Amino acid sequence: MATQRKGVLVDSVYSVIALLCILVACAELCGASAVVDVYRLIQYDLAGVPFGSRLASLNHHAGSSLFAPGADLSRTVVMLPVRELNVTFIREYIGQRKPLGGLLFLLPRMFSSEYKDSDGGDDDKPGKELLRNILVELERLLIHANIRYPVYFAFEDDKIDAVLADVKRNDATGQPATATTGGYKLVVTAPEPRKLAPPTITNIQGWLPGLKADGDSNQLPTIAIVASYDTFGAAPALSVGSDSNGSGVVALLEIARLFSLLYKNPKTRGRYNLLFGLTSGGPYNYNGTHKWLRSFDQRLRESIDYAICLNSIGSVDNELWLHVSKPPENAYIKQIFEGFHNVAEEVDLKVGLKHKKINISNPRVAWEHEQFSRLRVTAATLSELPLAPEFIKLVAESLARHIYGQQGKNINIFADDSSLGVNPSYVQSWLDLLSRTPRVAPFLSKNDPLIMAMKKELEDHTVEVNVQHEVLDGMFTFYDLTSAKLYIYQVASVTFDLLLLLVLGSYLIILFSFLVITTRGLDDLISLFRRPPSRKVKTA
Amino acid sequence: MTMFHFFNCAILTFGPHAVYYSATPLSEYDTLGTSVKAALVYLGTALVKLVCLATFLNVSESDSFDPYQELLKALIGFIDVAGLYFALTQLTHRNISQNHKFQAVGLGWAFADSVLHRLAPLWVGARGLEFTWDYILQGLEANANLVLSISLAALGSLMWLRKNKPRTLIPIIYACAGIVSTMPSITSYLRRGLGWHFAEVVGFELFVSLVMAFFSWQLFSTCQKPSA
């Protein structure tokens, strides 16, 4: 009976020990006071020259910009809220390559997608304008520098704000956080960033074929409408937004939808083929557009009457610019410009014409139409295109008048409330999607959901939709790890632990003495310390 | 640094047990075997308790204080007393005096409790980078628990092993034993029913343990006198 019981006991002990072993094995270092999503500064090589943030893993104490001048920050992650960013500090540190443990930029809440969803209300405009300038300056500095430490971006939230307030208080008292004074530790565990495979760029094209007259053997002329959809930014995972060139893409999709309605019916089908192209590689001299045009055969290229590139770089005022590379006196250019100008007058908008000659020897391509012009295709870029339905209407209307030969006549084809009107909710939903999805070409896979969505949308409205994958030309090499998780730990200092050890040691000694005195008497305690010498005396 | 902190917390949690063993006559009489046996009994008791808790208790989604569930829990908590009874009376010990026996049993009991309940959280938590006061408080709680266990063992040995004790003291002994053995339920009520913080609960536990230790010491010495 007893032995049996003992057996059970032993079994239970074994099971408990096994449980303990499992616990020890599973023990992970978790329990951070905050975990935040962070986005890494882009890292790339341009012709073998390194640019951007060269490291990903981070494990240093947090500091703020309030440190004592001349302090050694090589083991400190400096947390900088962009709202109160001191650009001269950044310029000094990045320009002079001073060592830092890392940089963490805190972007204001209003830029985060959650904030946009909850409250799209208009904030104070001048503050936004100032922020925008700071961000542009910051981005320019960061992208063109070779930074030897990790640089991350994060959105401000309550947790980070609390941490920052603590860190600032620490720094203000003149005790920057190091291993001996405690504070916060910022940890990002990440492997060494790896080179990405040569980035592919994906172009999507769709056709709306025009109506051929019977017995007409000539090929129909083609009008191309092109928008480049990808973008570039300091933090690839944060490169969202409707600028550069989200609104162009939305305008293109809406125009495709409108004309597909017209082209469905043979009676209203125009005598022009319409070619829609969503091109990639925009920030890299419109490399995607270049590849796309090269892939056309000669006959097709010659059949393009003209091409309209939709672009939208930081539209602020209500003025559109038509950028061309042929002199404005050119008959085609004149015709296109007149077309836009007339319609614009009707909807109270201004269209200006800007002419910039192409320098063939300069590899830098400023505007998308220049890629067309280099192949002797008449083309123009409409830029500063803000996203209002009127602008889409403007482009669609002037195109339609050209196609149906109604120039100069006051006919409203895409009237606002008709079935052919611009659909604001369609435009808005696409804008929302694009302003939420990061789209830096090297980090988009071939089957990225965004590309698939755009392809499907074009398929709905046009025929012969074709997706073309090309390798990005140029000397760019990109590195992975665009986003990570940042763990913020509140840490105690070594001095605290030393003090604790002292206190504990004295507590145990006092406890020992107390127990000895109460159970054996004071003499025993004293004799404990006397015994060794007396023993020595005996042995001697 | 984090290993250092773990080391500190481990000293606070397990140090007093070792000090108690080496400072008192327990070490002179070599009562380690008794302590180990008590610890094993504790493990068995914990297992039985676990089974009972799993069988009779609902898993509450909220962290609120449910009186009925807590009553059940307190009843199940008395399994501890049964385990202690077994350890004190049924186990064959080496021939040591009752005076040392209850101390050895209480020590083994408390040590097993500390290892089972506090070592794993300590290993997982205190090595992390994040600093909290929790593990230091937990160490203090282990100290209070040691004192309570020894008090309970002392009261138990008075109740079950000593035959000739003053009649007037018997109700007091039982009352004290009742208070000590319901301490887990009381602390649980304080924490969840009244929403006390961990630090306050630990402070209360330390205070109660010292008071109960004083009482049981007095009771034990008064019972000792007639026989002595």
Image: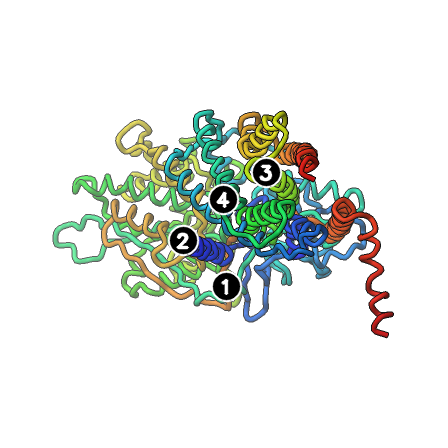
- For mark 1, does the 10 Å Cα neighbourhood hold few (<14), some (14 to 19), or many (20 or more) residues? many
Depth check, mark 3 against mark 2: the one in front is 3
Q: Which residue is mark 4?
A: B86
Q: Which residue is mark 3?
A: B162
Left/right of residue A350 with respect to residue A295 in the rendered view: right
Q: Which residue is mark 1?
A: A478
Q: Secondary structure beneath disc 2?
A: helix
Left/right of residue A459 with respect to residue B227 in the rendered view: left
> Which residue is found at the position 50% from the left and 63% from the top?
A478
> Which residue is found at the position 25% from the left and 45% from the top?
A460
- Amino acid, disc 3: Arg
Residue B26 shows in the view? yes
The circle drawn on residue B136 is none
**Spot occupied by residue A15 in the image (x, y as percentages of width and height):** 43, 55
User: Label 4 is found on which chain of the structure?
Assistant: B
**Mark 3 to mark 2: distance in Å?**
30 Å
Are the residues flagged by discs 3 and 2 in contact, CB closer than 8 Å?
no
* Colouring convention used in this rendered image of the protein: rainbow
Give the mark nearer the N terminus: 2 vs 1. 2
**Mark 2 to mark 1: distance in Å?**
62 Å
Q: Which residue is mark 2?
A: A8
- Amino acid, disc 4: Phe
- Amino acid, disc 1: Phe
- Amino acid, disc 2: Val
Are the residues flagged by discs 3 and 1 in contact, CB closer than 8 Å?
no
**Mark 3 to mark 1: distance in Å?**
82 Å
